[in-house]
Amino acid sequence: MAMAWMWTAMVAISLLFALLNGTVTQVANAAMEGAQTAVTLSITLAGVICLWSGIMEVIRRGGLAAALSGLLQPILARLFPESKDNPDVMEPLSANVSANLLGLGNAATPLGIRAVQAMQRGRVATNDQCMLVVLNTASIQLIPATVAGVRAAAGAFSPFDILPAVWVTSIVSVAAGIVTARFLAKRRPL
């Protein structure tokens, strides 16, 4: 609800300044151009999401996602010590991390929700739930499909030329998040 009020206030302030400056026509043109760009971007992103969701389905059916999940199990067992022996948690958790690695946040979200629900104990977030939120927020992406789609829609000549920067920032942000979550987990009793 707060965001709705903020957007309304920004639009109202913009219109007020446009009236005061005599630039209502330019503001109206910019609004129409922005709406057109938003529709074009949405259609392009829908295509990119469909493409990568299809690729993820091929990867899943081909067994690569299961293999990646299997490779992640030892790492995830160390990151999620409270849940490591619970297959109802580890299966969607490893699939969630795998989908995030492949840059498929849309596919990862329902898997992450399922993992969090399986981790739930009481009304307070567990350390494992907090760690999952950290990993999903700072996710390491090998293939940033959505960002590349936005860059392609914006006319980038080579939308995937950002890969090295994405990899470095992803690794640094995940490492910082893991260290912080571990530090805070030791300071907070369950």
Image: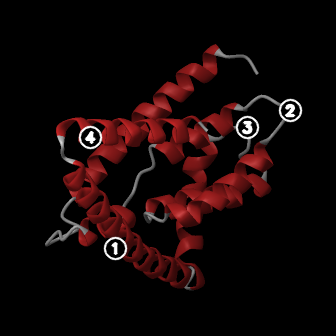
Q: Residue drawn 61% across and 63% down? A: 95
The answer to which of marks 3 and 4 sits earlier in the sequence is 4
Q: Residue drawn 62% across and 18% down? A: 186
Q: Residue drawn 57% across and 78% down? A: 60
| Residue 6 at least partly seen | yes
- Label 3 and label 1: CA atoms lie apart by 45 Å
Residue type of the residue flagged with mark 2: Gly
User: Toward the viewer: 48 or 102?
Assistant: 48
| In this rendering, position of residue 50 left or right of residue 78 | left
* Snapshot quadrant of residue 157: bottom left
- Label 3 and label 4: CA atoms lie apart by 59 Å
Residue type of the residue flagged with mark 3: Glu
Residue type of the residue flagged with mark 1: Thr
Q: Residues within 10 Å of mark 4 (few under 14, many from 20)?
A: few
SS of the residue under disc 1: helix
Q: Are marks 3 and 4 in contact (CB under 8 Å)?
A: no
Q: Which residue is mark 1?
A: 40
* Snapshot quadrant of residue 172: top left
The answer to which of marks 2 and 4 sits earlier in the sequence is 4
Disc number for residue 82: 3
SS of the residue under disc 4: helix
Estimate the x, y position of residue 11 in percent, counting from the top left: 39, 43
Q: Which residue is mark 2?
A: 122
Observer-side mark, 3 or 2, equals: 2
Q: Which residue is mark 4?
A: 19
